[in-house]
Every structure is written in structure tokens, then in C-alpha cells.
Image (spheres, rainbow, N blue to C red):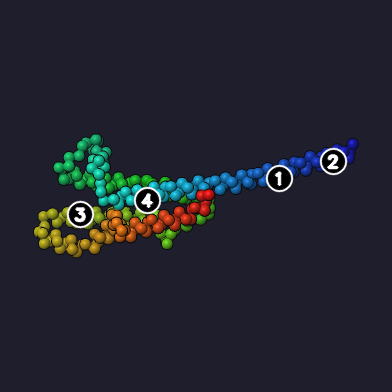
Amino acid sequence: MDCLKIILDCIAAIASLGTLVLVWFGLRTWRIQLKGENKFKLSLDALRELKLTLIAVDDYRNPFYPAGEIYDAYSKRNDGKILDNRNDIDLRKAQKYAESDRWGKIIDKYLIFEDILLRLSILIDNYEIDLIDGKRLKDYLIDIRNNRIEKEYADEEEKELDNASTEERIKYRKENRENRLKISAVLTRQGKDDIWGKNLEQYFDEINKRLRKYIK
């Protein structure tokens, strides 16, 4: 009886150990699978939000503003008041409001992208996954921000010439032509010669390649 009891105890111990091993392997497999699923989801979400941010950037750089967009931007800031397009002052304000709304959409989308990308970077332990040729998406947006400020200054300077002579206005525009072109190259689509826009497209292509390995 004692021998049988010992044998049974050994079998029970081995079975318990086997169960623990199976549980450990099961948990390990589950953790690996969960980590893979998280990489997949975060990579997919990051690409989606990056693309939506770039769509917002492209919309911002479109020089055409539909009348409805301008009217809505004005109405939103004036308790529903309807814009009188014969009032040049209000019309300029409305156009500025519409531009500001487009910029706000870029920032909103970018913040979502940045949050998702940070979580992915922590998971894969790579904090340079979004660094392409020394630039991140943030650097492109800073470029837009800086040129927005430059444009505001340039517009104010030109506005001060409203009462100046034709010769003075022509001279001013010649002297500031290069600066205006530089600003426009960032803030406005340039068709086939849109170098800034193409650089941003290449940035997306590289990020897409890097994240594709997690989307399988």
C-alpha cells in the first residue's frame, strides 16, 4: 500500500507539473499572440491617422476656398451671423477664419497620430520609426506653421501700402517676390513642381514600408 501511495503521489506531482508547464506555455503563447495583435492594430491605426493627417494637409494647401466654407467659418465665430460679402473687412476675417479651421483640422489629426505612434514605439522599442531622412511629420507641420506666420507678416506689410503709389507697390512686390514664392511653395499646391508636397508623399511611403511588416 505504501508503495502504491508513493507511486500515486508521484503521478499526481508529475501531472501537476505538466499542468503548470502547459499553463506557462499557454500564457507565453497568448502574450506573444496579444503582442502581435497589438502591433498589427497600432500599425494599422498609425498608418490610417497619418494618411488622414496628410489629407488634411493637402486640403489646407488647396488655394480654393468654397463660399460655403468661408461663410460657415464666419458664422461659427459670430453666433450664426450671415457674412455680408460686400464688407471687405468681414470678408477678409472670414477667409482667415476658414484658413485657421483648416489648420486646426491638421493639428487634431496629427495629435491622434502622435498618440498612436508613441504607443507603437513603446511596444516595439523603436522611437525612431517615424524618422525619415532626419525629419518627422512634426517637422513638416512646423514648416507650415512658420510659413503661416511669415505670410501674416508679409500680408500686413503689403496692406500698409494700400495708400502708396503704384511705383512703391511694384517696387515692394519685386523686392519680396522671392520670399512670397518660398512661402507659397509650402502653403500652396504647386502642381507638377510641388517639391514640398512630393517630399511629404515620400515620407508617407517610407513610413508605410516600415509599418507593413507588422500588418500581416
In primary-sequence order, the first of circles 1 and 3 is: 1
Q: Label 3, secondary structure: give it.
A: helix
Crowdedness near tag 3: few (<14), some (14–19) or many (≥20) residues, C-alpha within 10 Å = few
What whole-number distance in Å separates the C-alpha atoms at marks 1 and 4? 49 Å
In primary-sequence order, the first of circles 1 and 4 is: 1
Q: Residue furthest left?
A: 165
Q: Circle 1 sits on which residue?
A: 21
Q: Is residue 131 left or right of residue 174?
A: right
Figure check: 66 above or below 166: above
Q: Circle 4 sits on which residue?
A: 54
Crowdedness near tag 1: few (<14), some (14–19) or many (≥20) residues, C-alpha within 10 Å = few
Q: Amino acid at mark 2?
A: Ile
Figure check: 150 above or below 119: below
Q: Is residue 106 left or right of residue 154?
A: right
Q: Circle 3 sits on which residue?
A: 156
Residue 161 shows up from this direction:
yes
Crowdedness near tag 4: few (<14), some (14–19) or many (≥20) residues, C-alpha within 10 Å = many
Crowdedness near tag 2: few (<14), some (14–19) or many (≥20) residues, C-alpha within 10 Å = few
In primary-sequence order, the first of circles 2 and 4 is: 2
Q: Label 4, secondary structure: give it.
A: helix
In primary-sequence order, the first of circles 4 and 3 is: 4
Q: Circle 2 sits on which residue?
A: 7
Instruction: Please provide percent x and percent y for residue 34.
Output: 57, 45
Q: Amino acid at mark 1?
A: Val
Q: Amino acid at mark 3?
A: Glu
The image quadrant of residue 9 is top right
Mark in the foreground, 1 or 3? 1
